[in-house]
Image (cartoon, rainbow, N blue to C red):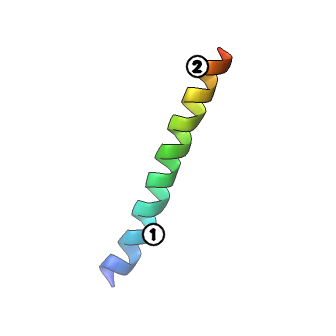
Amino acid sequence: MMLCLLWPIKAVSLLLNLLHLHLGVLRKKKKI
């Protein structure tokens, strides 16, 4: 039960981290 709840949370947090890094790189390229 615990693992079933933990996996989606970890997957979402990982995706959010990747998205945040991607946005940071775009900002550096555009120099906003």
Left or right: 5 in relation to 32:
left
- In this rendering, position of residue 5 left or right of residue 12: left
The local secondary structure at tag 2 comes to helix
Q: Which of marks 1 and 2 is in front?
A: 2
Picture coordinates of residue 24, whole percent (x, y) = 55, 29
Residue 12 pos. (x, y %): 49, 59
Query: Circle 2 is placed at which residue position?
Result: 28
Q: Decide: is 30 above or below 18.
A: above
Percent coordinates x, y for residue 30 in the rendering = 68, 19
Say whether residue 28 is left or right of residue 8.
right
Rate crowding at label 2 as few (under 14), some (14 to 19) or many (20 or more) other CA atoms within 10 Å: few
- The residue labelled by disc 1 is 8
Q: Quadrant of the N terminus?
A: bottom left
Residue shown at 44%/62% (left/top)?
Answer: 11
Res 23 quadrant in image:
top right
Query: What amino acid type is highlighted by mark number 2?
Result: Lys
